Amino acid sequence: MVFSAMPRISATARARIPGAGRSVTRGRAGVALLAGLLAVVLAACGGGGGAPEPSPTTPPPVAPQITITPADGTGGVAVTEKVVVTSNVPLESVTVNRGASESQQTPAGTLLGEFSPDRRTWTSTGGLFADSQYQVQAVTAAAEGVIGTATAASTFATGIPEKSFKVSWEPVDGQVVGVGTPVTLTFSGPTTDRAAVQGRLVIRTEPAIEGAWSWASDRVVRWRPKEYWPSGTKVHVEANLAGLEAGNGFVGVKDRVMDFTIGPKQISYVDLQTHTMEVYQNDQLVRQMPISGGKGGKPSFLTMEGPHNVLGKADLVIMDSATVGIPKGDPEYYYEEVQWAVQYTSGGQYVHSAPWSVASQGRANVSHGCVNASPADAEWFYNFSQFGDIIDIRNSGRPPDLSQLGNDWSIPWSDWVAGSALPVTAAADAGSIAAPPAQGDTSADRPGA
């Protein structure tokens, strides 16, 4: 804005200042006022001012809301479903309790889950058990801008899949076993996804031991250490199968856990050339026995070589040769009630009492494949033996049949590891964890499959 001098202006003359919106009387007071106005106008032209910013507004308080899926009162929920809790505000806590199921032989337990980073969503991480009732409770957190807290609950029940995928295993919970014990899991049906199933299996040992899973078939998987177990090792096993789609229409219906302990180191060495059996406990010789092994003539009449793990024992076993291809009428047919039988192959070979061959024991091999011992020695060995002890047989001329149980220690370690459906990781090699951690339920059942 430019102001110019005007001729013949009196001391009381008025002048209009453009943009000021009013008249100003010019004199001494008027000049001072005009100078002040000029300073204000020039400052405005310099661009340093402007309209003041509006003050921020406070949002209205929020009422907390919770949604739970499955909804309250839902029945027949598939075990493959997830429990999901959502809220428009952060959640303080979510608990999901499972009731016991008589049909599934499962106790009460808790379903675990995890929160989203903003804690507005909770999703279950474990699988649902079949034929079980679940109770969900969720509470929102107190927070600024939130009207109080909210609590919500839901009760729902699961159904039973048409084809249940379950597991049975050896050894069993609480058992004390030998240093050669493999952990053998047998499933109720064949899986088409071994990796998915194996991913739900967990082995933890104390102390940590190198070991691996190896599949024998689509229904059987085993875990063993690279070397014999050290005595005193504590072993924890989990099969977290609840909600798992295993293929062929099979769906996991529950989780299972068990714990067992490795007992004293008991290894027996059988030499078919010297016709002797030496029994060691914790590397000390405790008994030497004369024995008689398989007489030969055909492969099935030879005693199977290799380190075998004891599969079980019975104080009386009926041995009928017709069950192994020698029918009645055959000169080699036999039918015997045999006492003090300790089994070491699934094909039917035992260490057992054989009073009929005592004269040959320590001198010649005359059996149809089993290891014959005197009644006194056989009874002692029966009482001495535990599941998973090692019976190491040598110099028979018959190699181990790896398709039979009891021969796991005859499989080279590289071949054993190749039977795993997942890479054998460093964690698995260490033995402390041989599969991902448990899928969330901390109270899986211990009864039978």
Image (cartoon, helix red, strand yellow):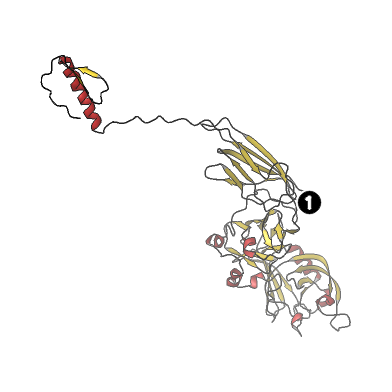
User: Residue 412: horizontal and vertical position, in percent?
Assistant: 60, 73
Residue at the right extreme, as displayed: 329
Query: Is residue 373 shown above or below 27?
Result: below
Residue at the bottom extreme, as displayed: 297
Query: Is residue 235 shown above or below 111?
Result: below
Query: Is residue 296 shown above or below 343?
Result: below
Q: Secondary structure at mark 1?
A: loop
Q: Kindly indicate the quadrant of the structure image that contains residue 328.
A: bottom right
Viewed as shown, does residue 162 lie left or right of 50?
A: right
Which residue occupies 79% across, 66% down? Answer: 379
User: Residue 333: horizontal and vertical position, in percent?
Assistant: 85, 80
- Which residue does the numbered mark 1 point to in the structure image? 103
Residue 171 appears in the figure:
no
Foreground pick, 377 / 420: 420
Q: How many numbered badges does the structure rendering display? A: 1
Foreground pick, 182 / 275: 182
Foreground pick, 173 / 117: 117
Viewed as shown, does residue 266 lie left or right of 114?
A: right
Quarter in which the C terminus is drawn: bottom right
Residue 221 appears in the figure:
yes
